[in-house]
Image (spheres, rainbow, N blue to C red):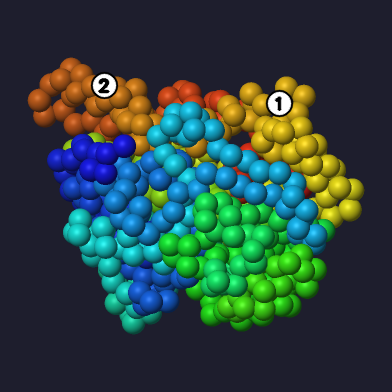
Amino acid sequence: MSATSKSSVQTTSPVKFLVTGGGIAGLACALALRRVGHHAVVLERGNRKTVRGEGGLRLPPNVTKIFFQWGLQDALRASASVSHTIRFTRYESGESLGRQVWNAEVLKETQGIFMVITHAELYDILYEAAIRAGARVQFNAEVVSVAAKEREVELATGETLSGDVLVGADGEYGPSRTAVAKRQLQGAHTGLAMYDTIVPSKYLPECLAALRKDNDVLVAFGEGRSMLGFPVHNQEDFALQFYGPDENIHGTYGDPPSVPVCEIAQTLDPQLRSIVENARMAVRIPLRAHEDLEDWVHDDGRLVLIGDAAHPFPPGTIQATAMAVEDGAVLAKLFSHLSEERQIDSFLLAFQELRQSRAEDVRASEFNASFFMSLSGDGAAQRDAAMRAQYLAGGNALDGVGGETSAAWEQIRTIFGYDCEDAADDWWVQWGLLRERALEREMYDGGEGTSHAPPLLDFSAMTVQTREEIWRQAIPLTPMGYGAHVLGYGGPRLYEE
């Protein structure tokens, strides 16, 4: 796999994109837009230090593939680690429930790899790449209101900025999502929270030495609680994400660490007490059930939502970062074909059509998976028994039973093997060009001086997403990238409000 950048079609009509939100979603979008020749200005309310964050991230093949195509392979390999195996244990006892070694042939087919990294490291990679590409990033620029019809945003300072297209990458509570939904959306409290922290690897017990050496991911299933962990910072540290009950409704990424790990891990395996005692204070992020938005594009102007502003993912899930990056990649791919301003509205609608069902389906499955990891009572017993049986039979923990293996691997190929930029190119070939040629014939038939207002495409019959048709029949996805129903769990439908 080449570390060089995959060539991109360049727009012949550059326009200015004003991106609200300078996190991973906003930076990835700005970089992607600059790669195809558009102007990109990013407005971030915080400073660079605070927005970088410090928690761990898992990058699945569908997003590492994008980064490789953007020429970021060398930068990623310098900071991230390749991970091949997930090890499963019981949260309270440390009993092994099996492992999942990702099939090399399947990964080769996806054209990506699994990697682990910190949010800060990925942020720096994208920020530096975006700046090199010519994007402008303005820190301490808090957007307080968005006027889609006027294509303007107002900053807390009173300054007004405008662009040809507004992109809302400011998260589930930002003004962009509120503007599109036309109401403030908070989501429903679920009673579960994720606690994000890091512990120096020197405090890992001997039983986890191999995990650190091999960059494995540890997943501990408990009674109403769970934990994920993996090496970061070139194995010097260990990222930890605890899930557990919490009635506190406040907390989000970017908040200062405030929760002592000893308070949330009282029932953790005693062998891991050294982790609890030496971990940094954790950041609390409650899991909230957010409704699916009917529209990602404002009906009065050129404002489009991406990332958590469009589809808020549960914290810590494997596809949260990937879906946000895919959004930016698809938006840029579509707009690489921009030759006239009149195409903008059609491209924005095409973006929603290409992205909405995939992102919402994956988000729903990831939401269910957060609860699957933290089942209690009979549900936890059934989950553990199914995994234990696979382990004792000598197979991968997630291969499934009773003939489910092929469905599980088909899911992996569909989700991890999906190439979002190819999907955008397919749309252009099958629909975009078709519309342009129809318009040319219409103008030609009308003769000189005849003015025609080109209609927007009707996407209701769109069939370009053949891979998505497969996905919509696929099984639910968990944070580890497997079908929860393989282990007999469909999950609560709490994401529906």
Residue occupying the point 29% across, 51% down: 74
Labels 1 and 2: the sequence-earlier one: 1
Residue occupying the point 45% across, 59% down: 117
Seen in the picture, residue 465 relative to 257 is either above or below; the reply is above
Seen in the picture, residue 390 relative to 97 is either above or below; the reply is above
Residue occupying the point 64% across, 30% down: 408
- Amino acid type assigned to the residue bearing label 1 in the image: Glu
Quadrant of the image containing the N terminus: top left
**SS class of the residue under badge 2?**
helix
Q: Which residue has dot 1 on it?
A: 404
- Picture coordinates of residue 442, whole percent (x, y): 22, 21
Q: Which quadrant of the structure image shows residue 261? A: bottom right
Q: Which residue has dot 2 on it?
A: 438
On the rendered structure, is 282 left or right of 395? left
Q: Is residue 330 visible?
A: yes
Residue occupying the point 44% across, 42% down: 113
Q: Nearer the viewer, residue 64 or 345?
A: 64
Q: Which quadrant of the structure image shows residue 350? A: top left
Residue 120 numbered mark, or none: none
